[in-house]
Amino acid sequence: MNFVVFAGGVGGAKLSHGMARSVGAGLLTVIVNTADDLEMHGLHISPDLDTVMYTLAGIANPETGWGIAGDTFGNFEMLQKLGMQPWFRLGDRDLAVHMTRTQLIKEGRTLSEAVALLSQRLGIESRILPMTNDRVRTIVDTDEGLFSFQEYFVKARWQPTVRSLIYEGAEEAEPLPQAVRAVETASTIIIAPSNLYLSIDPILSMNDVKDALLNASAPIIAVTPIIGGEAVKGPAAKLMRELGEEPSAAAVAEHYADFINGFVLDERDAHLKAEIEDMGVGVLVTDTLMKDEDDRARLACEVVNFADQLRPEKLGGCRLDQSALNAGADDSKLPSDVQNP
Amino acid sequence: MNFVVFAGGVGGAKLSHGMARSVGAGLLTVIVNTADDLEMHGLHISPDLDTVMYTLAGIANPETGWGIAGDTFGNFEMLQKLGMQPWFRLGDRDLAVHMTRTQLIKEGRTLSEAVALLSQRLGIESRILPMTNDRVRTIVDTDEGLFSFQEYFVKARWQPTVRSLIYEGAEEAEPLPQAVRAVETASTIIIAPSNLYLSIDPILSMNDVKDALLNASAPIIAVTPIIGGEAVKGPAAKLMRELGEEPSAAAVAEHYADFINGFVLDERDAHLKAEIEDMGVGVLVTDTLMKDEDDRARLACEVVNFADQLRPEKLGGCRLDQSALNAGADDSKLPSDVQNP
């Protein structure tokens, strides 16, 4: 058995962490968006890769969604004092990760090799793969002009109105061969509750990735990043509106409908179930909010069991530690509503 | 009136700080060795420039002689954790200075322009000049092979036996024009108590610098870095022995004798006075140890007044704040022994 998660930043990292706990870290491959990578201070910074890496290593800052828990900001404060007007807040320890990655790449390693080495040194058992070792960059076309992704996201705080998104370099980029192979041989593929345009589409926009998904024998399940018409975090709903979509879980399901087998809908959106089933997609209705670590494991386990119901032979479900689930049960979570159309 | 100090690291920084206090920061130009600069993590690091800069800005770490007081080391610790085996200990704030300098140079500024901007942002009134904007690097030829300066100094803790020193690039390097002009127009020139081979000779090894000193109208005073046959700090005495010189203040005076007018000898070496005077060099005997900030100002003031005695017309001596001197007097410092051969 091996499990593949397509992930962007925080939502993808949380579900991946839940997967590592519920199915076993060694069985998990996370394919991560790199189209929001940036170069700054001569450093190669990979925000989504780092969020996944820090989360799986158990060192992520739970308050910010980025960076390392307990990190200090002496460097950032000094850059400010020196008049550099830094707009991308890097912690002192976080910076060391960027310095190490940049050094490894300068020494001739690929990004994926650098990530493997960093993961190993951080004690991560799961396999974290950048979507590609080539350069793909999301360019945001807005009413205020073109922005690089991080300028749009961090500097402009995603306030400009978006007209379109360009995944620069995606057509020429070679998706990471190990990632394509992981999709081909997966027993379950999960599209994390990440931003569909900013995190997942850049991965899908590369040649062969969509084909690999369409040809995959494993059930493919997408988890909604939208609850009650709003994004759990970030600009997903705002972007959907600006790009002419209705910001709803159903629109997300529609967006993925040609290649997913199942969709995980939040219980607050249960009324959309039939609409999504009409797309030929199985629906699991459950609490998709991951407020704590037990939520992550519980949701991951439900998604894995849901996938099991969408294939001819069951694989035995997830191996979630029962003590973790019991801790979750104290929050009086309802049994999930699993249905197969 | 303008005062020029040739400086390396800690000793040069301390005397420069004393000069800034005693003659007025705005009248001071410090010409700093850059032959121990290094590139690390893609950053341009200038240890001697930074030591002078931090000291004049009042933010130097008094315990280590390098780095910024109160700096944190989260970055360094994380690099260690990531297996990078960093051997050059950079504080988080210190790192911000290297990032800023590197960024400014990448944007097309020269090293001297970057230093000017950094100095301004740190509130430094004195003028700090790198000896050149070109690349000069001290290579240390030892019984264990060739070392870059910092590998010899930091990594090998200056333990290998030195056979010779090579100032790579010095012949092709253009000394900073402002530095040459400062020497030509100075009213007093001071060679700081820095390592003669590692800090001062790299500056002197560039074309035009020695000529400018030989043609300078200002008195040129060297302050001994050797007391009682030992270096106040660092490998100066060890190097003298290895390079076949007797490690003594007299040998330092001899080393500079062709261009200096005066030599400041420590009171513990008063017996060497006649020997140095026989070289045709005036001698000031005083306490040259700079244990605290008042020592720096007192020594600087004595050096300035000594220089005044070595020229036809006096310039009025130094403007040391008397309250500072009085604080120093509590340590029962003796009046200095000023003599002109």
Image (tube, coloured by chain):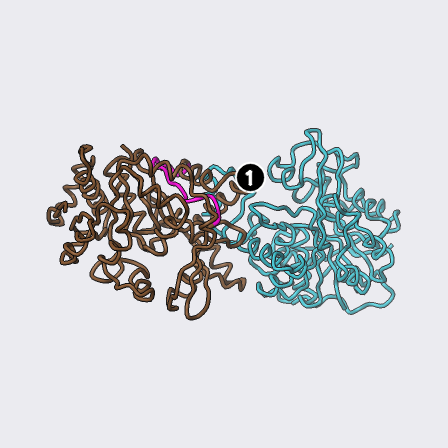
Chain colours: A brown, B cyan
Q: Nearer the viewer, residue A200 or B72?
A: A200
Front residue of this view, candidates A122 and A33: A33
What residue is drawn where x is 75% and y is 35%? B241
Q: Chain of mark 1?
A: A
Residue B334 placement (x, y as % from top left): 70, 55
Q: Amino acid at mark 1?
A: Glu
Magenta stretch: residue A98 in it? no
At which x and y percent is residue A91?
43, 52
One can see residue A88 in this view: yes
Residue displayed at 50% across by 53% down: A39
**Residue B216 percent location from the top left of the image:** 84, 60
Dominant secondary structure of the magenta stretch? loop
Please tell me which residue lies in front, A198 or B198. A198
Query: Furthest residue to the top?
Result: B143
Label 1 secondary element: loop
Give the number of callouts: 1
Query: Viewed as shown, does residue A307 lie left or right of B115?
Result: left
Q: Which residues are magenta?
A: A121-135
- Name the spot of residue A264 as percent of width and height, x first: 20, 49
Is residue A127 in the magenta section?
A: yes
Mark 1 nearby-residue class (10 Å; few <14, some 14–19, many ≥20): few
* Mark 1 lies on residue: A107
Quarter-wise, where is residue B149 in the image? top right
**Residue at (31, 48) in percent of width and height:** A12
The correct choice, above or below, for A205 with respect to B1 in the image is above
| Quarter the N terminus of chain A occupies | top left
Confirm whether residue B329 shows in the render.
no
Q: Quarter of the image holding residue B118?
A: bottom right
